[in-house]
Amino acid sequence: MPPEVRQSLISALLKHLPEPSSPVVLVARPDQPRPTPIRTNGHRPSVSVQAYNPSVAFILEISTILASRDAASLNLLGESVADALQNVVRDAANVHVLVLSRAVLYLMHLMNACQVWQDHSLFKTPVILHTISGFDQVVLEQVAQSVLGGLSLCIQQRTPLKHEIINTPDFWLILKNLHLAQSAAQAVFDIVQSIVTSEPIAVSADNFVAIVSLLDNFATAGSIGASVEQQSARRQQPPPPRDKRSPRHAESATDTTSPYDKDVVIRGYKAVVLTSQLIQRVPKLIEQSHLEFEEAWMTYWSLVFQKLQAQCLNPCRKIRRQACSSLQNALLSPQLSPASDEQWALIFRTVLFGLISRLLKPEIYQTDPVGMNETRLQAANLLCRTFLHHLPLLCQRDDLLELWLRILDIMDRLMHSGQGDSLEEAVPESLKNILLVMADSGVLLTPQPGTQSSELFAETRKRVDRFLPHLMNEIFPQVMEPENEATDPTSDADGSSMAPSISQSEQHGNTGSKGPPTSDERDEDAKIESHQEESAPR
């Protein structure tokens, strides 16, 4: 068919399309998706059902096929077909969902064809994505397959179109609005995964925050796996020997997990793994950032730490373990290189102290009573490893003693959290390892006979003796106790008690979760949470 004939045919066909009823208006929208309105009787408002006109879908399809055949056809027919498709998409509220779904898909195909034939003048990609992100949530979920299929097509190859799409905020808003839809969640995750793992790297300063936040949403959704894990643990327990289990008990032991729930957990786990892979990109993003170095450092690292710390509290054990491992990779990264007071405060006070403080709260413990003790042990090991890893830099700081005493306080709290023998055995071993490394490296100087102890050694001994009275003598047997020290390691020179109130309150009858926090403990936790809010990226 000659091009002139095709042009006449398309013009005649497009005249049969209904006139759009919605004006072209661009509205600024917040980053957060708006909540779905709810009727007073508790039901969702029904979307108005438009009559389905198959001729409209046919006209749009044949027009798209003819216009995208080659560069000449695109040049001759592309503009009129693009206008017709965009008119239908903009009029989404007054178009049947089947027609809208086809129109969105054809629009994406035509956008991709423009990229193939090197014609970038027909579309303004941000405008199209802005229009689609403005669909009603119910409508967006109904056309999700076409939207995500079209977007996947457009970002398959390394092209300027892909770069423009993945760096447009409305693209990420569309994915965010669809990531919990049962029919679209896997497709959304596949798109994010392809961007994170693509070569060459597609993660940039323009989309890093959006990617990390969306992956965090997937990980949070995976918390439904906690019930599955706890059901499995109950099934592995032997039945009571006194009689057979009742039918009700047998029914509760049955695995009622749906395949979709299992997929949600798998996506949540993979999301944490992908977040860990993004850690490697942080130094390059800081280097390319237009911000000052310290501001860029805080912007990117604090976001990663904040999201991984949150997933270290995920009720799902599988996701929580991976998050702890990923957080360790971040904190021990050779590219981390903290220098300023604010950076050190982020690492220890906000991330590590904040994490352990929250793990010690009874409401967090109750989300997974079986596995949370293991997470507390992981957090204790992570604190010790991070301190030792950064010890060469920390020993040059004036606040080393303050930080070290705070670590000893945290270890005291963990040891007396009342959660079995694992922490009671692990804490002394971890402290013994740290003290030996500090002594071997010359940071913790042991006093010679007839000389006075250094402030660091004296304060360390005083604090450790409060909850491990024999540890220092075991590690440093050659150091004699000062004659003016009382026999009771919990007493100061003036005879007043030096034992912290938390040890007293937790050692008496504490067999379950951690007892009520003391006033000092509550004040410290409040300071940590306040610091977390201040350091969170905006």
Image: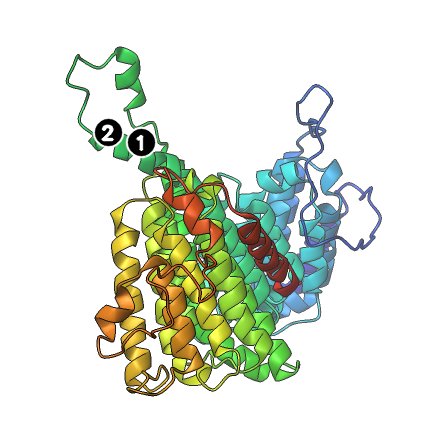
Q: Position of residue 522 (x, y in %)?
A: 57, 50
**Where on the picture, by quarter, is residue 528?**
bottom right
- Pointer 2: residues within 10 angstroms few (<14), some, or many (20+)? some
Q: Is residue 262 visible?
A: yes
Q: Position of residue 454 (x, y in %)?
A: 41, 83
Q: Position of residue 118 (x, y in %)?
A: 60, 74
Callout count: 2
Image check: 58 left or right of 364?
Answer: right
Q: Nearer the viewer, residue 84 or 200?
A: 200
Who's the residue at 50% across and 69% down the image? 347
> Which disc is residue 235 wearing?
2
Q: Is residue 325 visible?
A: no
Q: Which quadrant is home to the N terminus?
A: bottom right
Task: Tell me the SS state at disc 1.
Answer: helix
**Where on the picture, by quarter, is residue 408?**
bottom left
Identify the residue under disc 1.
231
Task: Tell me the SS state at disc 2.
Answer: helix
Who's the residue at 34% across and 38% down the image? 511
- Pointer 1: residues within 10 angstroms few (<14), some, or many (20+)? some
> Cβ–Cβ below 8 Å for labels 2 and 1?
yes
Report, in whole angstroms, how far the alpha carbon at label 2 lies from the one at label 1: 6 Å
Image: 403 above or below 469 = below
